[in-house]
Amino acid sequence: MKIPIVTYLAEYIGFFVAFFANMTLIHLILTRTRSNFGSYKYLMLWFAAFSLWYSIIDILTQPAMHSYLNSYIVFCASWFKYDPVLAPIIITSYCTSYGLTLVLLAIHFVYRYIAMIHPNQIHYFKYPKALIWPFLFIVVAVFWWCNVYFLLGSNATFNSYLNETIYENYQERIERLSYIGPLYFIIGSKGQIQLQWKSCLGMINVYCIAITTLVTIMSLGFAIYKKMQSVNDMVAEKTRALQKQLFHALVLQTIVPIIFMYTPTTVLFICPIIGVELGMIANMTSICLALYPALDPLVVMYFIRDYRTHLLKKLNLKRNVSSTTRITSITKNETEII
């Protein structure tokens, strides 16, 4: 199989960095998180654990992507690629994990919004009401998995449509591969458009969840930014410094998924609709998606000062860590805006 070497390289680099970064972050969350972080500790732990899972399912899948005319596919290119049982499960789980990452990001911003602007509603992130978030997560997981498996899976029409281009570019017979993706429509011999309703419905479901999470992140992120600006005019220098740190973390945790998740997948989703054929260039999307779980924990470890100073101390890269930590210690009220 002729997968671009840069794709394999990015996936392996992304996996190893993500694995060790998320394991380190999980250790820091469990051992270095202040007790007054409250429910945010468990939200961070949930996100880090899922990022670890995402990196594992990514390397098990080693997804390759191809865009052809009015379709695109994501197919399993790992050592499981010819397995008739495991390959469909793995590729479907990979696509589902992408969607669940977006959902977790949105939940992350909901917490920040409530803690910052409506702290009296923070009980929605405390037991037992906090169970609503894992329940929502499971519902979306089951829905996304079934949507991908039953509406965006392979079929005879799709196989016939892709057979030539897949063999030409990858030297593989499409019938032997497990893949997921939409075939939006076929243009007949007389120019008539034949909509593929299953694929269209499946992608509408994907668009709805992706757009909902993006709107949630952008709108709540902007509201948090405005609140930080108003608070900065009234607080002491120490609190203002903390707010600045949190704002920088918020900006990066918004920009990173937009660059590495939303933008490449949006291009991949839309190009077949407007007739732009990406071909093997579509593998740039799998590269971006492989790198994202490696970047997010690095952002968290850098901007949460307790984590950063602990790591720098362990690496003997910073002196007088204790004095720095004392200067920027976080009070109970201030942690509500993290």
Image (tube, rainbow, N blue to C red):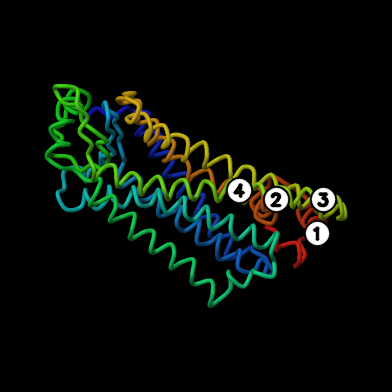
Q: Earlier in the sequence, mark 4 or mark 3?
A: 4
Residue 184 image-quadrant placement: top left
Q: Earlier in the sequence, mark 2 or mark 3?
A: 3
Q: Amino acid at mark 2?
A: Leu
Q: Amino acid at mark 3?
A: Asn
Q: From the viewer's perspective, tell me whether residue 315 is left or right of residue 14.
A: right
- Quadrant of the rendering where the C terminus is positioned: bottom right
Count residues near mark 3 (Cα–Cα under 10 Å), then give few for <14, some for 14-19, many for 20+: some
State the residue in front, 52 or 338.
Answer: 338
- Image mark for residue 219: 4
State the residue position of label 2. 246
Q: Are marks 2 and 3 in contact (CB under 8 Å)?
A: no
State the residue position of label 1. 326
The image shows residue 210, relative to residue 29, as above or below, that is: above
CA gap, disc 2 to disc 1?
17 Å
Circle nearer the viewer, 4 or 1? 4
